[in-house]
Amino acid sequence: MKHGKNYRESLKKYDPAKKYDVTEACQLVKDLHYVKFDETVELSVSLKLEKNQTVRDTLVFPHQFKGEKRVLVFCKEDRVQEALDAGATYAGSTEYLDKVKGGWLDFDVAVATPDMMKDVGRLGMVLGRKGLMPNPKTGTVTPNIAEAVAELKKGRTEFRADKGGVVHIAVGKVSMDTKDTAENVNAFLTELNRKKPADAAIGFVRSVSISSSMGPGVWVDYKEGE
């Protein structure tokens, strides 16, 4: 893969083969920033997973960096006001089922009460492709609407390992204070360690790297269990 001049120049500013502690790595990502827009800082963690293992959950970062999420709640009419009072952008049943079926996706995350999942499940072809299908594993299928919406509005973020066993997750913006970004990285790594499968092999975390959207990756010196 060919990279531009600015990217190649940034590689000269550090040792691409060296592993840095979290704070140093986050500062390097800021120092290597060369584009004019405020890039997202992204963390990539390669995991050693067996065929029957997966990692998937959610967390709320200590320092938020994304715009407020638009939350759609699929619920019966008697719970619509509860959802709206909790901060949902949209709430309802038939009206929104029909809109989504028609291709409307003007929201960032969907929540559903359990009694709605029979109908919501029929939208799998639409919601599934966009990663918007409510799922009990991520707390988006729940009878506790107010709690779920409140956490999502605070910035609750889903993470999951892809087919290659790699978790990719945004942890901040280049413009953020290095300390805040580092705290987000550490919060995620702590949560990931808690979600380690009970039968996971030694060396569960193969590698950790951090980068900006357009910049080169920086290896993180991470010891499993920290």
Image: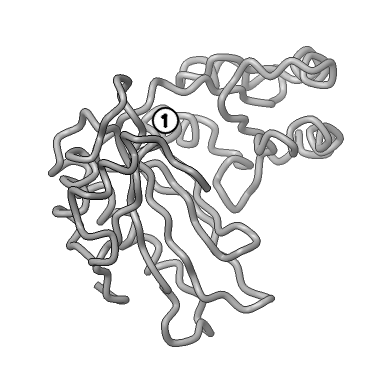
Look at 42% across and 82% down and name the residue there: 203
170 or 53, which is in the foreground? Answer: 170
62 or 213, which is in the foreground? Answer: 213
Residue 201 coordinates in the image, percent (x, y): 49, 86
156 lies above or below 20: above
167 or 7, which is in the foreground? Answer: 7
Q: How is the image coloured?
A: one colour
Look at 17% across and 39% down and name the residue there: 31
162 or 226, which is in the foreground? Answer: 162
Residue 183 coordinates in the image, percent (x, y): 20, 49
Q: Is residue 139 left or right of residue 12?
A: right
Q: Is residue 199 left or right of residue 50?
A: left
Residue 116 coordinates in the image, percent (x, y): 76, 33
Residue labelled with disc 1? 150
Look at 33% across and 43% down and name the residue there: 8
Q: Is residue 55 left or right of residue 221?
A: right
Q: Quadrant of the C terminus?
A: bottom left
Helix, strand, or loop for circle 1? helix
Look at 74% across and 33% down and name the residue there: 127
| Crowd around label 1: few <14 · some 14–19 · many ≥20 (10 Å) | some
> Which amino acid, mark 1?
Ala
Give the image quarter of residue 115: top right
Numbered disc total: 1
Q: Is residue 131 left or right of residue 127?
A: left
60 lies above or below 80: below
Give the image quarter of residue 44: bottom left
Give the image quarter of residue 180: top left
